[in-house]
Image: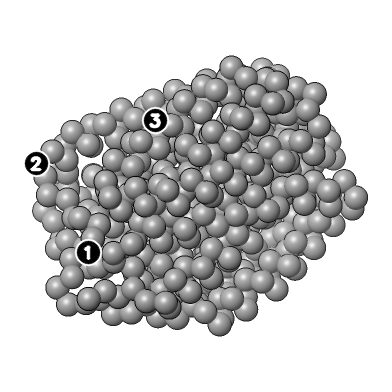
Amino acid sequence: MSIESRASWLVALAAVAILSVSFGAPLLVVVALRPIAADLGDARAIPALASSLAYFGAGAGGILMGWLAGRSSTRLVALLGGSMVCAGLALASGGAAWQLLLGFGLLVGLLGNGALYPPMMTYVSLWFDRRRGTALALVSSGQYVAGAVWPALFERLIAAHGWQRVMLGYGLFAAATILPLAALVLRPPPASLAGDVAVTGPARPAQVLGLAPNLALGLLALASFLCCIPMAMPAAHLVAFCGDLGIGAREGALMLSLLLSMAFLARQFWGWLSDRIGGLNTVIAGNLCQTAGMAAFLTTQDEAGLFLVAAGFGLGFSGIVPAYVMTVRELFPAREAAWRVPALLFLSLSGMAAGAWLAGFLYDRFGFYAIAWQAGIACNLAALALLGGLALRRRGAPVLSPG
């Protein structure tokens, strides 16, 4: 017996489509970082901060919106999120620094993607038992579908029409896409099968990995914060980094699309792997690959080499975030997922926000990106130390099989 059905996969595919559009919004700042900075006094920290606030807001909003979705419906929350993404891009297109920061931080981030990404991950996990890791990997790939589709198109549109018009137009497109999908497809998840621990999760545990449950979650979330700092650095600054090396904006946008396309393709493998070796082991493997990728960015500066490194980085890091969600679902009861998953994703997205901002700050201070890449590697090593300690504690402790 299983709760999985064709409807489960329809819901998962609708979630992918929604997130592939909603996460196009922060990519606008990435692709347009240099022209936005030029219009705002040539300081890259401002558009980099807007990108950071979008991720931070999505994480913080996920806690609030996860709570709201648990007490109303995911459909209602998603409708709110799609409307706010549109409103945020419309505000940011005004061109002033405060409009950019408020539009991306509050509307696109907190009330927009905050209502779409963390609640959607929790929601889809309730439709699956046997292939939950695969489904979570698919849904979280919406970010990378966005990265594969939008950067090259944004670069051409921005060159032809300017970043402000493109922002406004994309906001209207986002509303026209997200709102009908949310209204027509999203519905209450199926009831859990009685006694199926793969669906309901373990009973409320006295300890998790030999620790108090909230402490165990806190350490997992801290590790996710640390490993998401380097995850965001190349994605947020690759186009600008290429420009500094004399590589054109078109090539830089294509490189970003390649990185995120490879992340999308590899994420399906990482989801398959997490169904077989568990979430925590998958997180550790992904972090090892990400560390190697950051080291490669530090040592490569020619165009052909960077295309290769971007592809390898995308292949390596893409399984980390859904594997964290898988780990939470393995260790904690399903009834706690509505707040534990968004709480962990808040730290993950905050790490992405910190990484995008930190790379811009360090660039403005030193005039090159090598220091930022080095800082990212240090954060990744710290995350691996934490995860290794948790993995050692897991020996002898019962962990729920993913099914």
Q: Residue 392 location, x and y as percent?
A: 18, 33
Q: Secondary structure at mark 1?
A: helix
Sequence-wise first label, 3 or 1: 1
Q: Are marks 2 and 1 in contact (CB under 8 Å)?
A: no
Task: Name the residue located 46 percent from the left edge and 32 percent from the top edge.
Answer: 290
Q: Is residue 310 rendered to the left or right of residue 390?
A: right
Q: Which residue is mark 2?
A: 396
Specify the quadrant of the image occupied by residue 70: bottom left
Where is residue 207 drawn, in percent x and y? 13, 49
Q: Tag on residue 198? A: 1
Q: What is the CA distance from the residue labelled 3 to the residue labelled 2?
A: 24 Å
- Give the residue type that dot 1 points to: Ala
Residue 130 relative to residue 46: left or right:
left
Please, which residue is most extreme toward the left here?
A: 396
Q: CA distance from mark 2 to mark 1?
A: 20 Å
Residue position marked by numbered label 3 in the rendering = 288
- The answer to whether residue 319 shows anywhere in this view is yes
Q: Amino acid at mark 2?
A: Gly
Residue 93 visible here: no
The residue lying at 73 percent from left, 35 percent from top is: 252
> How many angstroms separate mark 3 from mark 1 (CA)?
28 Å
Q: Of marks 2 and 1, which one's residue comes earlier in the chain? A: 1
User: Counting residues from the N terminus, which is met first, the one under dot 3 or under dot 2?
Assistant: 3
